[in-house]
Structures are given as structure tokens and as C-alpha cells.
Image (cartoon, rainbow, N blue to C red):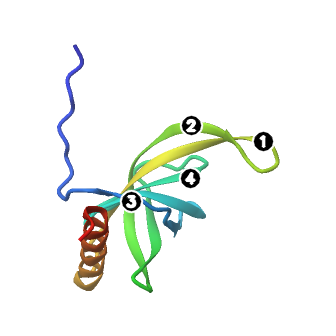
Amino acid sequence: MEKKQPDRRKNPRFILGKEMKGRTGALDEVSLVNLSLGGAMVEHPGAVDQESMSSLSLELQQQTFSLRCRIVWSQIERHELDPEGKQVTIFRTGLEFLDPPEAVQGVIDNYIQLLIEEKEGL
């Protein structure tokens, strides 16, 4: 029987219910899958080097932020066809934010709270 690995995240993650794009230094455009105060999971075509440093640029509440991050893990999620009919490998990658400024953490926290309220219909 396979043992379940403990969740090592320091912050709970929030799965985004709507499409959200960002940009990283290691990649070009990425789609955010989930977000927390400590990091994000992104989806993108093309492989990246694990444990390398990058940055994530995202727009939250009409403000654009660039966050230094470390690529913690990356794995193949699926294969799909691009608009030209070529097969593309889509990866999911976990990013850890490195020392985000308090003001940016506040904006991320507010954004997550707004999404939770929307989801709960408040």
C-alpha cells in the first residue's frame, strides 16, 4: 500500500476557478492553477530546470507584481495539440515565492479572500 506524502506547504493553496495568466523568467506565458501566500502552481508548455530561480509576474487587483521564486518541482501533466496540429507537452510546475514584500502578500491574501467569497456566494 502506497504511503501518502505529508503536505509540506506552509500556506493553504487556493485552486483558481477562472483562467489567470502570468509570465515567468524561465518560461514565457503560464496559466495559474493555484495560488497561496507562499507560492503557486503553474501550467505551461516546455520543460524547466527544477531548483532553478525565476520570477513570476502576475496581475492582481489591477496591479502587476514581479515575485522572485524558486522552481520546486515540475512534471508532465498531459499532451495536447497546438493550433497548428503539433503535439505539445504540458507541464505543471510548483513555484515557491522568495521573500515577497509584505504589501504584495497583502494583495495576494485579499485576492484569495475575494475568490473565496465569490465561491461561497457572499
Q: Earlier in the sequence, mark 4 or mark 1?
A: 4
Q: Which residue is mark 4?
A: 44
- Please state the horizontal and vertical placement of residue 17, each as a whole percent of the image: 40, 58
Callout 2 amino acid: Arg
Callout 3 amino acid: Leu
Label annotation for residue 16: 3
Quarter holding residue 81: top right
Label annotation for residue 48: none
Q: CA distance from mark 3 to mark 4?
A: 16 Å
Label annotation for residue 86: 1
Q: CA distance from mark 3 to mark 2?
A: 19 Å
Callout 1 amino acid: Lys
Q: CA distance from mark 1 to mark 2?
A: 14 Å
Q: Earlier in the sequence, mark 2 or mark 4?
A: 4
- Please state the horizontal and vertical placement of residue 19, each as a whole percent of the image: 50, 62
Q: CA distance from mark 2 to mark 4?
A: 10 Å
Q: Earlier in the sequence, mark 3 or mark 1?
A: 3
Q: Quadrant of the N terminus?
A: top left
Dot 4: few (<14), some (14–19), or many (≥20) neighbours within 10 Å?
Answer: many
- What residue is shown at x 61% (from left), y 49% (from top)? 45
Left/right of residue 28 with respect to residue 39 in the rendered view: right
Q: CA distance from mark 3 to mark 1?
A: 28 Å
- What residue is shown at x 47% (from left), y 46% (from top)? 92
Against 9, residue 61 (above or below) is below
Mark 4 touches mark 1? (CB < 8 Å): no
Dot 3: few (<14), some (14–19), or many (≥20) neighbours within 10 Å?
Answer: some
Quarter holding residue 34: bottom left
**Which of the two marks, 3 or 2, is nearer to us in this view?**
3
